[in-house]
Amino acid sequence: MTPRPTTAAPAPTGGPERDRGDGPRSADCVFCAIVGGRLPAAVVHEDERTIAFLDITAVMDGHTLVIPKRHAADLWEITPEDAAAVMATVHLMAGRIRDVLAPDGLTLFQANRDAGWQDVFHLHVHLVPRAAGDHLHRPWKADPVPLERLAATRARLSAPSPEHPDRTAV
């Protein structure tokens, strides 16, 4: 793998993005710029399909992002193969965070589109190490719902998809 700068040095200007043979990227995507070597990052893991780096807006020490190298705006756009690779790297980095930082817990967060709170439109998963009593809080309060209220939605989600009649959820 090509070494990457790990400081917040200014991004290089001009010149082509490195051709790493890992698929298309979006020219205006900050994460694609990290993958392409045009922006620095504190990379903690890299493989053929994914890269993991520390979040520059970390909410806790060790807050890590895992992204696919191939640009995919969100979970609906990523290929199943790249999604599996991202999750494998999430699992790997969760183990590293546990072993090295010894947090009390770990929160995973992945958002899609504006309404889902996504702010960088390149799929990414946050791994946030947690400490008992830390400053982070759940964004909603969950209350139990009777199964009868879920029946109609369950039926819709478990039925064959018109776009993919060979796929059912149940």
Image (cartoon, grey):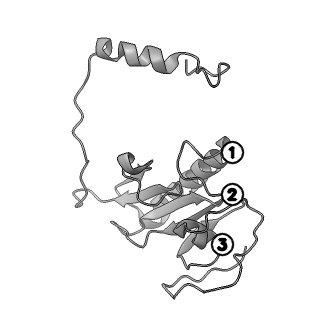
Res 49 label: 2
Query: What is the three-letter code of the residue carrying label 3?
Result: Gly
Cβ atoms under marks 2 and 1 closer than 8 Å: yes
Q: Can residue 2 be seen in this view?
A: yes
Query: Residue at coordinates 41% horizontally, 59% vertically from top-left?
Result: 119
The mark tally for this picture is 3
Image spot of residue 137 (x, y percent): 23, 52
The residue under label 1 is which amino acid type? Glu
Q: For this view, does 80 lie left or right of residue 123?
A: right
Which residue is tagged 1?
A: 81
Label 1 sits on a secondary structure element that is helix
Look at the image and tell me in which quarter the C terminus lies: top right
Apparent side of residue 108 relative to residue 137 in the rendered image (left or right): right
Residue at point 65% right, 41% down? 80
Task: State the SS at label 2.
Answer: loop
Of pointers 3 and 1, the one earlier in the residue sequence: 3
Q: Real-space Cα distance between discs 2 and 1?
A: 9 Å
Above or below residue 14? Residue 83 is: above
Q: Looking at the image, do the residues carrying marks 3 and 2 touch, with CB atoms under 8 Å apart?
A: no
Q: Mark 3 points at which residue?
A: 36
Q: Marks 3/1: CA distance?
A: 20 Å
Q: Which of marks 3 and 2 is in front?
A: 3
